[in-house]
């Protein structure tokens, strides 16, 4: 009897999840169903693929060798299905996209309606996480990452760059001392990040010529929280253009010291795990996002 795709998928998902229970959740199957699929696969191959203990799973030597082939087979089937969709000019299937909350809210959400009308056969799953995630663990097809990429094992597509600026609501500025230079910032309420301390380096040169490191009077972990605080007139914030372009255009947020601002650009990349040609649904999403993101930066 030949190995089935169901058995291969169960094996790969268990390996990626490092847990039969987690794999069952991801596959929407029962734990016993996944265990039986693994048992059938090992029986057909006449070898053990996983060493099981009460605390962990580990690949055997045979399991490591077979895993490479199993991934290639599943990727080939996925690509074949995508190619059939391309032939019908209707890319189809589930597409999982992950991004930080502010990018999802201000850049992806505004274009989703147009994308779904253009590609009605693509089922979207949009997830947010303000920290870098493991794509395999979270079963993510595309993750949008802002800043310098650190994982060289990922494929990446550059989407653009976003400048960081210091901003405040007009009501806040009108009720506080004027700001003519960076020293004047010492007399104002500065809003900063609790995490990713580098984001508390603002795009101004200090007396040493380095980027100005601020001490926040009020901190938050989310850029969207800081944006809302600035809109409420609680102080001055430094955020990327992709999440403030509408606020700046409407005058709800005004740039501070534009002539003294150092042009600090954050790269925006889409990252993904694909050993073969990109699937149609991933390709069309990235093409669509690339064509629209320029108007949002």
Image (cartoon, rainbow, N blue to C red):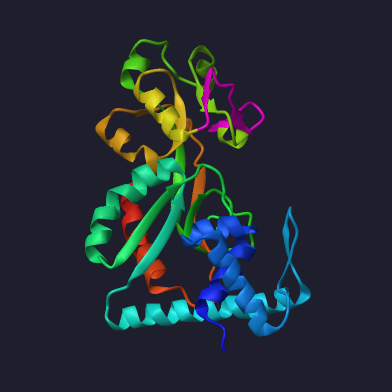
Residue 153 vs 250, above or below: the answer is below
Whether residue 168 appears in this view of the structure is no
Residue furthest out toward the right: 61
| Front in this rendered view, residue 143 or 79 | 79
Percent of width and height locating residue 138: 53, 55
The residue depicted at 39 percent of the width and 52 percent of the height is: 126
Percent of width and height locating residue 26: 50, 58
Residue 41 vs 54, above or below: the answer is below
Percent of width and height locating residue 11: 60, 70
Callout count: 0
286 lies left or right of 188:
left
| Front in this rendered view, residue 244 or 179 | 244
Residue 213 within the magenta-colored segment of the rendering: yes
Residue 218 within the magenta-colored segment of the rendering: yes
Question: Magenta part of the protein: which range?
Answer: 200-221
Quadrant where the N terminus sits is: bottom right
The residue depicted at 71 percent of the width and 73 percent of the height is: 49
| Front in this rendered view, residue 236 or 139 | 139
The residue depicted at 28 percent of the width and 53 percent of the height is: 111
């Amino acid at each position: 009897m030949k190995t089935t795709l169901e058995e291969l998928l169960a094996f790969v998902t268990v390996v990626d999840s490092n847990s039969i229970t987690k794999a069952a959740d991801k596959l929407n199957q029962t734990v016993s169903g996944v265990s039986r699929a693994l048992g059938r696969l090992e029986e057909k191959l006449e070898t053990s693929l996983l060493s099981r203990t009460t605390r962990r799973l580990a690949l055997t030597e045979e399991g490591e060798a077979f895993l490479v082939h199993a991934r290639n087979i599943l990727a080939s089937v996925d690509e074949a299905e995508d190619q059939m969709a391309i032939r019908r000019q209707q890319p189809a299937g589930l597409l999982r996209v992950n991004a930080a909350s502010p990018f999802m809210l201000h850049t992806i959400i505004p274009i989703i309606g147009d994308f779904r009308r253009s590609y009605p056969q693509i089922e979207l799953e949009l997830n947010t996480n303000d920290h870098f995630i493991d794509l395999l663990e979270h079963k993510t097809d595309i993750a949008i990452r802002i800043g310098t990429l650190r994982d060289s094992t990922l494929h990446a597509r550059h989407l653009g760059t976003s400048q960081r600026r210091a901003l405040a609501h007009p009501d806040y500025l009108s009720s506080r001392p004027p700001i003519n230079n960076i020293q004047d910032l010492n007399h104002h309420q500065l809003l900063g990040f609790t995490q990713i301390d580098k984001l508390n380096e603002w795009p101004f040169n200090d007396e040493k010529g380095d980027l100005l490191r601020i001490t926040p009077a009020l901190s938050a972990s989310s850029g969207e929280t800081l944006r809302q605080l600035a809109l409420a007139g609680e102080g001055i914030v430094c955020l990327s253009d992709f999440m403030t372009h509408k606020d700046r255009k409407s005058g709800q947020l005004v740039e501070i010291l534009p002539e003294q601002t150092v042009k600090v650009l954050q790269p925006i990349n889409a990252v993904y795990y694909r050993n073969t040609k990109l699937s149609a649904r991933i390709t069309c999403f990235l093409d669509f996002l690339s064509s629209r993101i320029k108007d949002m930066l």
